[in-house]
Image (tube, grey):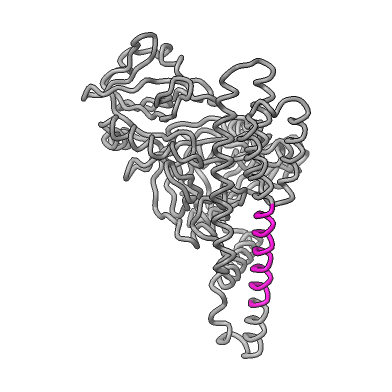
Amino acid sequence: MAVITEQQIQAMAPNAAAAANGKKISQKGGFVRLEASADGSFYLGECTGSGKSNYITSADFIDPMSPVCRCSCPSRQFPCKHGLALLFEIAAGKKFGVCEIPEDILKKREKKQARDLKNSEENEGNENASETGSDADAEALAKKKASAAKSAKNARVKKLKKQLEGLEMTSKLVQDLLKSGLGTMGGTALSTYSQLSKQLGDYYLPGPQKLLNGLVLEISAFRKDADEEHYEASIDILEKLWALVKKSQKYITEKLEKDEVELDDSELYEELGGVWKLTELEAVGRGRKELDLAQLSFWVNFNPAANQYEDTGCWADLASGEIFMTYNYRPMKALKYIKAEDSVFGVAHVPVAACYPGEGNLRIRWDGAQIRALGEEDLKKLRSLAASSLQTEAKAAKNILKNALADPMLVRLVSYELIGIRDGEYVLKNAGGETVVLGDMPGMEGSLNRLGLLPDGSLLENQVLLGAFFYDRAAKRLKMQPLSILTETEVIRLLY
């Protein structure tokens, strides 16, 4: 029988309502017939519904990591609630009769295998084309590929040159601001900078465009409430924008001079606004295999500069304790087309994944994963991998955070002896007597106050904390925002 968990089903659902309705159908005995193939790769159910006839729904597990649901109901959701209900029946271990795999499903499998084979041959460059066809066909294919490669290269060169033009314009803008001061962005100047920001889209620079939008928003907010926090945030954005412009100008110029315009292992590609494909990340050596990742924290922020929601997950590698990040971006203009991510409370076994270039907590992506429950052995392993030296972790955080292009936080697992209040602030102390002040990072949902709401005071003693180091510019010191507490039996999430 196929193995699937409720968390996987929740992840597959197009929305929370569909998952809830599917579970309700399963719990109320909505199926009048349940059957499965002898090899456990195909499941079929006959489900009562609002129509005159029952609905026939199926789940094809030919790819166990990504089962495909089909249903005869008129719903446009995929999977529909009936398909999800069938998955809940499988997860619950219900009894299934035996059936043959329908002919139409076998044909769909053959078509999928043919597509996969074709894609595989194309990705490998059809090196054996001459063996399966005539020499003329192989030569024609080679010419076609060479022409496509030349066109792609010319397009990349054109794009890089256009980006250089936009970066030069941005460089002059930043230099003017540095000379005249942020105070000059008031009044009509804000409107001018907003227009300049829109122009950056024509230069393939959505990254700098987002930063400039953020700068305009922070200055606008500062002019309204005179809160120094907005001014400090403006300085941070301006520093990052300047660093990005200077590094990118050098990077692109060198690529054009050396005539090496293909994608490479550089974080600047994404910082400028490029979008990596999974296959591209693997091609530049960013692939990872056979990972077991436990999600320890999850939150959703709205980024006004990019006008989008950002779903963020923190995942710990059970083998090394390394913390990876997942990001799901949902622009407002496409909100109804992009599914929101949700918390995962288990361990994801990931056969193939890829990490993005960068330093600190690397962003990671994968296409399929098998989810299982997080057990006490997993927690024991993670707790053993937690850092014992705050000094070492703080030094690493400072080295990374001083890079203007790095993420403004570094997430780590640290063991502690006590979390308490000193001089009106929460402080974490480890077994060696080292301490770090806890706080809420600007722009993040607060979690500090939840330490005082914990049901058991023992959670503040001799546990492991998943925390985010960040630099508090106002206090001029490194702090840590608490995200989750790992005990011997569970993960207590402070962000949810």
Q: Is residue 114 left or right of residue 415?
A: right
Residue, x 69% and y 70% (percent of image)? 151
Count the labels in the image: 0
Give the x, y percent position of residue 98: 53, 52
Q: Nearer the viewer, residue 75 or 25?
A: 75
- Quadrant of the rendered structure where residue 80 is? top right
Does residue 314 appear anywhere in the picture? yes
Magenta stretch contains residue 63: no
- Residue with the most extreme front position: 179
Q: Is residue 366 above or below residue 495?
A: below
In this view, 147 is above or below 207? below
Q: What secondary structure do most residues of the magenta stretch adopt?
A: helix
Residue situated in front as seen by the camera: 80 or 354? 354
Identified at 41% across, 34% down, the residue is 411
> In terms of depth relative to the viewer, which is nearer, 310 or 190?
190
Relative image position of residue 406 (x, y in whole percent): 48, 41
Looking at the image, which residue is at 33% across and 13% down?
420
Q: Can residue 14 be seen from the camera position used here?
A: no
Residue 276 locus on image (x, y percent): 57, 53
Which residue appears at 39% of the width and 53% of the height? 290
Q: Which residues are magenta?
A: 146-165
